[in-house]
Amino acid sequence: MAETSRHGSLVYFPRRAGRPAPHKQPIVPELPEVEITRTGIAPYLQGRKITGVVVRQPRLRWPVPRELPQLLIGRCVQTVDRRGKYLLMRFEHGTLLMHLGMSGSLRVIDPAEPATVHDHFDLVLGTQAVRLRDPRRFGAVLWCAGDASDHPLIATLGVEPLSEAFSADYLYAASRARRQAIKTLLMDHRVVVGIGNIYANESLYRAGIRPSMPAGRLSRAGAARLVEAVRDTLRDALAAGGSSLRDFVHSDGAPGYFQQQYYVYDREGLPCRRCDTPIRRIVQGQRATYYCLRCQPARPPAKAC
Ligand SMILES: [Zn+2]
Protein backbone atom coordinates (compact mmCIF):
# COMPACT_ATOMS: atom_id res chain seq x y z
CA MET A 1 0.00 0.00 0.00
CA ALA A 2 2.49 2.57 -1.15
CA GLU A 3 -0.35 5.00 -1.71
CA THR A 4 -1.26 4.69 1.89
CA SER A 5 2.00 5.64 3.39
CA ARG A 6 2.56 8.41 0.91
CA HIS A 7 -0.24 10.45 2.36
CA GLY A 8 -0.38 9.46 5.47
CA SER A 9 0.36 9.04 8.09
CA LEU A 10 1.45 11.80 10.03
CA VAL A 11 -1.68 13.62 10.71
CA TYR A 12 -2.18 12.61 14.27
CA PHE A 13 0.52 10.24 15.37
CA PRO A 14 3.80 8.91 14.16
CA ARG A 15 3.56 5.21 13.39
CA ARG A 16 5.57 3.05 15.69
CA ALA A 17 7.77 0.36 14.33
CA GLY A 18 6.36 -3.13 14.37
CA ARG A 19 2.73 -2.10 14.25
CA PRO A 20 0.44 -3.37 11.54
CA ALA A 21 -0.57 -0.91 8.87
CA PRO A 22 -3.70 0.81 10.13
CA HIS A 23 -5.82 0.30 7.02
CA LYS A 24 -6.92 -3.13 6.05
CA GLN A 25 -10.29 -1.89 4.83
CA PRO A 26 -11.07 0.07 1.68
CA ILE A 27 -11.72 3.75 2.15
CA VAL A 28 -15.34 4.73 1.62
CA PRO A 29 -15.60 8.37 0.62
CA GLU A 30 -17.10 10.37 3.46
CA LEU A 31 -17.76 14.06 3.77
CA PRO A 32 -14.10 15.16 3.92
CA GLU A 33 -13.21 13.08 0.87
CA VAL A 34 -16.17 14.49 -1.06
CA GLU A 35 -15.29 18.04 -0.05
CA ILE A 36 -11.66 17.53 -1.04
CA THR A 37 -12.87 16.08 -4.34
CA ARG A 38 -15.04 19.16 -4.85
CA THR A 39 -12.12 21.46 -4.16
CA GLY A 40 -9.92 19.43 -6.48
CA ILE A 41 -12.21 19.35 -9.52
CA ALA A 42 -14.01 22.70 -9.21
CA PRO A 43 -11.29 24.78 -10.91
CA TYR A 44 -11.47 22.49 -13.94
CA LEU A 45 -15.25 22.75 -14.21
CA GLN A 46 -16.44 26.15 -13.11
CA GLY A 47 -16.96 28.54 -16.02
CA ARG A 48 -16.04 25.82 -18.53
CA LYS A 49 -18.18 24.43 -21.33
CA ILE A 50 -19.05 20.75 -21.57
CA THR A 51 -17.88 19.42 -24.94
CA GLY A 52 -18.63 15.76 -24.43
CA VAL A 53 -20.43 13.30 -22.16
CA VAL A 54 -19.35 9.65 -22.14
CA VAL A 55 -21.51 7.06 -20.39
CA ARG A 56 -19.77 3.67 -20.53
CA GLN A 57 -21.87 2.03 -17.83
CA PRO A 58 -25.33 3.47 -17.15
CA ARG A 59 -26.13 0.96 -14.42
CA LEU A 60 -24.89 2.70 -11.32
CA ARG A 61 -26.95 2.90 -8.14
CA TRP A 62 -29.66 4.42 -10.30
CA PRO A 63 -29.61 4.48 -14.11
CA VAL A 64 -27.59 7.33 -15.58
CA PRO A 65 -30.10 9.43 -17.61
CA ARG A 66 -29.83 8.68 -21.33
CA GLU A 67 -30.44 12.27 -22.29
CA LEU A 68 -27.40 13.65 -20.43
CA PRO A 69 -25.36 14.39 -23.60
CA GLN A 70 -28.20 16.43 -25.08
CA LEU A 71 -28.73 18.20 -21.76
CA LEU A 72 -25.11 19.09 -21.07
CA ILE A 73 -23.07 19.45 -24.27
CA GLY A 74 -22.53 23.11 -25.06
CA ARG A 75 -23.57 24.21 -21.56
CA CYS A 76 -21.37 25.97 -19.02
CA VAL A 77 -20.80 24.71 -15.48
CA GLN A 78 -21.60 27.60 -13.17
CA THR A 79 -20.57 26.24 -9.77
CA VAL A 80 -19.57 22.98 -8.11
CA ASP A 81 -21.13 22.73 -4.66
CA ARG A 82 -21.58 20.01 -2.08
CA ARG A 83 -24.58 19.03 0.03
CA GLY A 84 -23.90 16.12 2.34
CA LYS A 85 -22.00 13.66 0.18
CA TYR A 86 -23.62 14.86 -3.05
CA LEU A 87 -21.66 16.97 -5.51
CA LEU A 88 -23.89 19.50 -7.22
CA MET A 89 -22.69 20.77 -10.59
CA ARG A 90 -24.99 23.66 -11.32
CA PHE A 91 -25.89 24.73 -14.84
CA GLU A 92 -28.20 27.48 -16.00
CA HIS A 93 -30.96 24.98 -16.65
CA GLY A 94 -30.50 22.48 -13.84
CA THR A 95 -28.04 20.54 -11.68
CA LEU A 96 -25.98 17.42 -12.23
CA LEU A 97 -25.95 15.42 -8.99
CA MET A 98 -23.08 13.05 -8.39
CA HIS A 99 -22.50 10.68 -5.48
CA LEU A 100 -19.35 8.62 -5.04
CA GLY A 101 -21.10 5.72 -3.31
CA MET A 102 -18.86 3.14 -1.66
CA SER A 103 -15.85 3.28 -3.92
CA GLY A 104 -16.18 6.17 -6.37
CA SER A 105 -13.57 8.75 -7.22
CA LEU A 106 -13.30 11.61 -9.68
CA ARG A 107 -10.11 12.59 -11.45
CA VAL A 108 -9.12 15.21 -13.97
CA ILE A 109 -7.54 13.48 -16.94
CA ASP A 110 -6.70 13.75 -20.62
CA PRO A 111 -9.86 12.52 -22.39
CA ALA A 112 -7.71 10.35 -24.62
CA GLU A 113 -6.55 8.31 -21.61
CA PRO A 114 -7.81 4.76 -22.09
CA ALA A 115 -10.68 3.88 -19.76
CA THR A 116 -10.49 0.91 -17.42
CA VAL A 117 -13.41 -1.42 -16.80
CA HIS A 118 -14.35 0.67 -13.74
CA ASP A 119 -14.31 4.07 -15.50
CA HIS A 120 -18.03 4.56 -16.07
CA PHE A 121 -18.56 8.23 -16.87
CA ASP A 122 -16.64 11.20 -18.31
CA LEU A 123 -17.53 14.86 -18.47
CA VAL A 124 -15.33 16.26 -21.24
CA LEU A 125 -14.28 19.91 -21.16
CA GLY A 126 -12.14 20.45 -24.25
CA THR A 127 -8.68 19.07 -23.59
CA GLN A 128 -9.55 17.76 -20.13
CA ALA A 129 -12.14 15.47 -18.68
CA VAL A 130 -13.49 14.62 -15.24
CA ARG A 131 -13.71 10.84 -15.02
CA LEU A 132 -15.75 8.78 -12.56
CA ARG A 133 -14.21 5.50 -11.49
CA ASP A 134 -16.43 3.34 -9.29
CA PRO A 135 -15.60 -0.37 -8.97
CA ARG A 136 -18.62 -1.19 -6.80
CA ARG A 137 -21.08 0.97 -8.78
CA PHE A 138 -22.96 2.36 -5.77
CA GLY A 139 -22.26 5.87 -7.02
CA ALA A 140 -24.79 8.02 -8.84
CA VAL A 141 -24.99 10.46 -11.74
CA LEU A 142 -28.40 12.13 -11.91
CA TRP A 143 -29.97 15.19 -13.47
CA CYS A 144 -32.28 17.60 -11.69
CA ALA A 145 -34.03 20.10 -13.92
CA GLY A 146 -35.29 22.28 -11.10
CA ASP A 147 -33.71 23.51 -7.90
CA ALA A 148 -31.56 20.69 -6.51
CA SER A 149 -32.67 21.48 -2.97
CA ASP A 150 -36.11 20.12 -3.93
CA HIS A 151 -34.73 16.84 -5.26
CA PRO A 152 -35.96 13.91 -3.11
CA LEU A 153 -32.39 12.83 -2.34
CA ILE A 154 -31.43 16.32 -1.19
CA ALA A 155 -34.64 17.58 0.42
CA THR A 156 -34.54 14.95 3.17
CA LEU A 157 -30.96 15.65 4.24
CA GLY A 158 -30.25 16.89 7.76
CA VAL A 159 -27.95 19.70 8.78
CA GLU A 160 -24.34 20.09 7.64
CA PRO A 161 -21.98 19.04 10.46
CA LEU A 162 -19.66 22.00 9.94
CA SER A 163 -22.50 24.53 9.91
CA GLU A 164 -23.80 26.43 12.92
CA ALA A 165 -27.07 24.52 12.62
CA PHE A 166 -25.28 21.44 14.01
CA SER A 167 -25.24 22.67 17.60
CA ALA A 168 -25.34 21.00 21.01
CA ASP A 169 -28.97 22.08 21.35
CA TYR A 170 -29.82 20.57 17.99
CA LEU A 171 -28.16 17.22 18.69
CA TYR A 172 -29.59 17.07 22.19
CA ALA A 173 -33.11 17.71 20.88
CA ALA A 174 -32.68 15.23 18.03
CA SER A 175 -31.60 12.49 20.42
CA ARG A 176 -34.49 12.77 22.88
CA ALA A 177 -36.55 9.61 23.36
CA ARG A 178 -34.42 7.76 20.81
CA ARG A 179 -33.61 4.18 21.72
CA GLN A 180 -31.26 3.64 18.79
CA ALA A 181 -27.53 3.70 19.50
CA ILE A 182 -25.90 7.11 19.48
CA LYS A 183 -23.58 5.98 16.69
CA THR A 184 -26.57 5.04 14.54
CA LEU A 185 -28.11 8.45 15.17
CA LEU A 186 -24.87 10.18 14.24
CA MET A 187 -24.84 8.31 10.93
CA ASP A 188 -28.51 9.11 10.17
CA HIS A 189 -28.36 11.56 7.27
CA ARG A 190 -31.81 12.86 8.08
CA VAL A 191 -30.30 14.23 11.30
CA VAL A 192 -26.80 15.28 10.22
CA VAL A 193 -25.22 14.62 6.84
CA GLY A 194 -21.95 13.14 5.76
CA ILE A 195 -20.79 11.31 8.89
CA GLY A 196 -19.96 7.78 7.83
CA ASN A 197 -18.55 4.88 9.76
CA ILE A 198 -14.98 6.10 10.10
CA TYR A 199 -15.77 9.55 11.40
CA ALA A 200 -18.62 8.35 13.63
CA ASN A 201 -16.19 5.98 15.35
CA GLU A 202 -13.52 8.63 15.67
CA SER A 203 -15.87 11.37 16.89
CA LEU A 204 -17.40 9.18 19.61
CA TYR A 205 -13.94 8.26 20.84
CA ARG A 206 -12.90 11.90 21.00
CA ALA A 207 -16.09 12.72 22.90
CA GLY A 208 -15.62 9.80 25.32
CA ILE A 209 -19.01 8.31 24.46
CA ARG A 210 -19.72 4.59 24.05
CA PRO A 211 -21.04 4.05 20.50
CA SER A 212 -23.73 1.60 21.68
CA MET A 213 -25.24 3.99 24.23
CA PRO A 214 -28.94 4.65 23.54
CA ALA A 215 -29.13 8.09 21.96
CA GLY A 216 -31.82 9.15 24.42
CA ARG A 217 -29.28 8.91 27.25
CA LEU A 218 -27.02 11.53 25.73
CA SER A 219 -26.64 14.38 28.21
CA ARG A 220 -26.59 18.02 27.21
CA ALA A 221 -22.88 18.12 28.09
CA GLY A 222 -22.32 14.95 26.06
CA ALA A 223 -24.09 16.53 23.09
CA ALA A 224 -21.79 19.54 23.33
CA ARG A 225 -18.71 17.32 23.48
CA LEU A 226 -19.91 15.23 20.57
CA VAL A 227 -20.64 18.22 18.34
CA GLU A 228 -17.16 19.57 18.97
CA ALA A 229 -15.62 16.14 18.43
CA VAL A 230 -17.40 15.76 15.08
CA ARG A 231 -16.22 19.19 13.94
CA ASP A 232 -12.64 18.56 15.08
CA THR A 233 -12.53 15.14 13.42
CA LEU A 234 -13.84 16.44 10.10
CA ARG A 235 -11.62 19.52 10.15
CA ASP A 236 -8.54 17.41 10.81
CA ALA A 237 -9.49 15.14 7.92
CA LEU A 238 -10.00 18.12 5.61
CA ALA A 239 -6.64 19.54 6.63
CA ALA A 240 -5.01 16.18 5.91
CA GLY A 241 -6.72 16.00 2.54
CA GLY A 242 -5.35 19.30 1.35
CA SER A 243 -1.99 17.72 0.78
CA SER A 244 -3.48 15.12 -1.55
CA LEU A 245 -5.12 17.56 -3.95
CA ARG A 246 -2.56 16.89 -6.63
CA ASP A 247 -3.91 13.37 -6.95
CA PHE A 248 -7.10 14.62 -8.53
CA VAL A 249 -5.23 15.95 -11.52
CA HIS A 250 -3.64 13.77 -14.17
CA SER A 251 -3.56 10.84 -11.80
CA ASP A 252 -3.60 7.39 -13.28
CA GLY A 253 -3.54 5.58 -9.99
CA ALA A 254 -5.94 4.66 -7.24
CA PRO A 255 -8.39 7.17 -5.80
CA GLY A 256 -6.52 10.03 -4.25
CA TYR A 257 -8.10 9.63 -0.86
CA PHE A 258 -5.83 10.54 1.93
CA GLN A 259 -5.12 8.16 4.71
CA GLN A 260 -4.90 9.14 8.30
CA GLN A 261 -4.00 7.45 11.47
CA TYR A 262 -7.07 6.93 13.54
CA TYR A 263 -7.71 6.75 17.27
CA VAL A 264 -9.91 3.65 17.10
CA TYR A 265 -11.08 2.91 13.56
CA ASP A 266 -9.71 -0.39 12.26
CA ARG A 267 -7.53 -0.78 15.35
CA GLU A 268 -9.08 -3.84 17.02
CA GLY A 269 -6.76 -5.26 19.64
CA LEU A 270 -4.25 -2.44 19.36
CA PRO A 271 -3.63 -0.32 22.45
CA CYS A 272 -5.74 2.80 22.97
CA ARG A 273 -3.62 5.82 22.16
CA ARG A 274 -4.58 7.43 25.47
CA CYS A 275 -4.75 4.59 27.98
CA ASP A 276 -3.29 1.49 26.30
CA THR A 277 -6.46 -0.57 26.79
CA PRO A 278 -6.93 -2.83 23.73
CA ILE A 279 -9.44 -1.36 21.30
CA ARG A 280 -12.62 -3.42 21.01
CA ARG A 281 -14.59 -4.16 17.88
CA ILE A 282 -18.31 -4.89 17.76
CA VAL A 283 -20.81 -4.85 14.89
CA GLN A 284 -23.68 -2.37 14.90
CA GLY A 285 -26.13 -2.34 12.03
CA GLN A 286 -23.71 -4.46 9.95
CA ARG A 287 -20.97 -1.84 10.37
CA ALA A 288 -17.82 -2.30 12.43
CA THR A 289 -17.65 -0.24 15.58
CA TYR A 290 -14.40 0.35 17.44
CA TYR A 291 -14.07 1.82 20.93
CA CYS A 292 -12.04 1.92 24.12
CA LEU A 293 -13.71 0.38 27.15
CA ARG A 294 -12.03 2.81 29.49
CA CYS A 295 -12.08 6.07 27.55
CA GLN A 296 -15.67 5.54 26.40
CA PRO A 297 -17.49 4.31 29.52
CA ALA A 298 -20.88 2.61 29.17
CA ARG A 299 -22.36 4.95 31.74
CA PRO A 300 -20.73 8.34 31.55
CA PRO A 301 -20.77 10.28 34.81
CA ALA A 302 -24.08 12.06 35.24
CA LYS A 303 -23.74 15.80 35.03
CA ALA A 304 -26.30 18.43 35.73
CA CYS A 305 -26.87 20.58 32.74
ZN1 LIG B 1 -8.53 4.39 26.20
Image: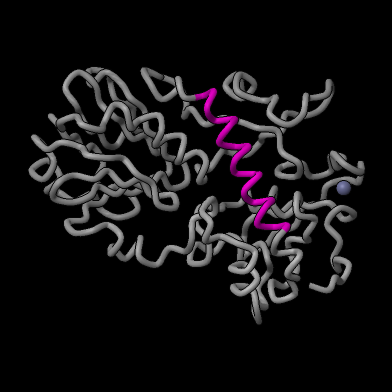
Report x, y in % for residue 57: 26, 41
Which residue occupies 38% across, 46% down?
82
Report x, y in % for residue 295: 86, 53
Query: Foreground residue, 273 or 287?
Result: 273
Q: Quadrant of the C terminus?
A: bottom right
- Judge whether residue 241 is colored magenta: yes
The way the protein has been coloured in the rendering is one colour
> Above or below — where is 47 with respect to 195?
above
Report x, y in % for residue 242: 52, 27
Q: Is residue 78 left or right of residue 255?
A: left
Which residue occupies 52% across, 41% down?
32
Which residue occupies 49% across, 55% down?
160
Which residue occupies 40% across, 52% down?
83
Q: Is residue 194 left or right of residue 136?
A: right
Q: Taken as a whole, is the magenta stretch helix, strand or loop? A: helix
Query: Which region of the structure is painted magenta?
Result: 225-244
- Judge whether residue 134 is colored magenta: no
Report x, y in % for residue 271: 87, 40
Q: Is residue 138 left or right of residue 285?
A: left
Most distant residue in the bottom direction:
177
Q: Quadrant of residue 301?
A: bottom right
> Above or below — where is 219 with respect to 122?
below
